[in-house]
Structure formats: C-alpha cells, structure tokens
Image (cartoon, rainbow, N blue to C red):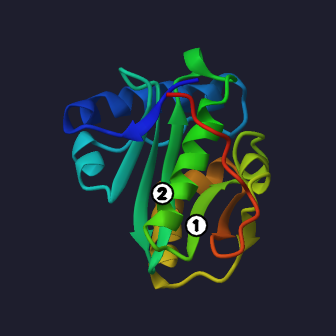
C-alpha cells in the first residue's frame, strides 16, 4: 500500500500527468461519450486548499477545496499503472479523515453517475446524490457544463455528512 501524505510543492508539477493518465481510462473503456476536457493547469494545484498524494513519487492524488463552507473533493486521480490495488480507496479515506479533522461537517463532489469508479465508488463510502446546491456548488456545476462534461455523460453532485459518517478508515501501513 502506498503512503498517503500531503503533497510537497515540488510534487505539484507531477500531478497533471497523473490526471492525464487517469483521464485516458475514460476514453479506453468508453465510459463517456468523448474525450474529457483539458486537465487543470499546474498553477491551479498550487492554489488548492489541500492535496494528498500516494507514493514517492506520487502515483495518485486527492485535491480538496472549500466550497460553500464544506470540503469539496475536486479531483481524485490514480495513474492506471497503479490501479486496482486500493490507492483510490486509501486517498478517499484520507481525504474524508482530513476533512473531518479540519472541522468540516460535510464533503461534496461532482462526478459521473454511471462510471463504476465514479458515483458507485463514492456511494460505497456513504456519499449520496444531492440537488441541494448552494451558490458555490452551482458555479462548479455551471463550469463543468460549459467545459462540456455534461455532454459526455450524466453527472451528479454527491454529499457525505461527516458528522454521522459510519465509515471507519483502514489502518495505514507506515
């Protein structure tokens, strides 16, 4: 299992390549109706509230923002060469734990409904679809729509109540 830790400034420039590799899996498996929009530029990673990475050098990351007073999982990506060994699960567990420890009462995210490693994956951790979107989440959804994401497949916003979450993270190996 890869160690999950905060990203260093020097590692931020490595994250777009991980996102690109993960996004190619959507194309290869035909999960969406076309190629995903261009990835986030490096400077956006440096502006994130918190980024956690797996491995040295990183092979996956979770990017967390504050949106409407709640933690928002902006991106979770794992290089497919390191997929299916629990890195995405470990990153999500760590992101949830970080948000809870940071005093957030909920975590939100926006994702594809029918991609198995999107909405169904997050639902296993207690995330539920919501249509109660505050102004900031509405802006995120509008940005996704203008970027063409909704044309690729049905999307949903999901929310996890961190105060009543029954999920218990697995112990991490040193």
Q: Residue furthest top?
A: 81
Q: What numbered label is drawn on residue 108?
A: 1
Query: Is the residue marked by circle 1 packed among few (<14), some (14-19), or many (20+) residues within 10 Å?
Result: many
Residue at the spot 35% in from the left edge and 54% down from the top edge = 50
The quarter of the displayed image where residue 16 is located:
top left
- Residue 13: name its quadrant: top left
Q: How many marks can you see?
A: 2
Could you tell me which residue is drawn at 49 percent across and 28 percent down? Answer: 174
Name the residue carrying label 2.
Answer: 98
Mark 2 Cα-neighbour bin, 10 Å: few <14, some 14–19, many ≥20: some
Is residue 12 shown left or right of residue 128? left
Which of the 4 quarters of the picture holds residue 78?
top right
Q: Work out which quarter of the rendered image holds the N terminus and state it.
A: top right
Q: Counting residues from the N terminus, which is met first, the one under dot 1 or under dot 2?
A: 2
Foreground disc of the pair 1, 2: 2
- Residue 96 in percent (x, y) is at 57, 57
State how far apart marks 1 and 2 are (Cα). 14 Å
The reply to whether residue 34 is visible in this rendering is no
User: Where's residue 116, x and y in %?
Assistant: 78, 40
Of residues 74 and 88, the one nearer the viewer is 88
Q: Please tell me whether mark 1 sits on a helix, a strand or a loop.
A: strand
What residue do we see at 65% from left, 47% from top?
Answer: 152
Residue drawn at (44%, 28%), measured in percent from left and top?
18
Looking at the image, can residue 69 be seen?
A: yes
């Amino acid at each position: 299992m890869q160690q999950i830790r905060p990203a260093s400034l020097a590692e931020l420039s490595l994250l777009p390549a991980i996102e690109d590799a993960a996004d190619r899996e959507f194309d290869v498996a035909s999960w969406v109706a076309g190629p995903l929009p261009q990835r986030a530029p490096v400077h956006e990673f440096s502006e994130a509230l918190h980024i956690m990475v797996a491995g040295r050098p990183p092979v996956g990351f979770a990017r967390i923002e504050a949106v409407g007073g709640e933690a928002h999982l902006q991106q979770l990506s794992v290089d497919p060469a390191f997929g299916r060994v629990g890195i995405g699960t470990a990153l999500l567990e760590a992101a949830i734990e970080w948000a809870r420890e940071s005093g957030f009462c909920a975590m939100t995210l926006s994702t594809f409904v029918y991609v198995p490693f999107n909405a169904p994956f997050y639902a296993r951790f207690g995330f539920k679809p919501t249509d109660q979107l505050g102004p900031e989440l509405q802006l995120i959804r509008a940005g996704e729509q203008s970027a063409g994401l909704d044309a690729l497949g049905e999307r949903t916003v999901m929310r996890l109540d961190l105060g009543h979450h029954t999920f218990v993270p697995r112990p991490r190996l040193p």
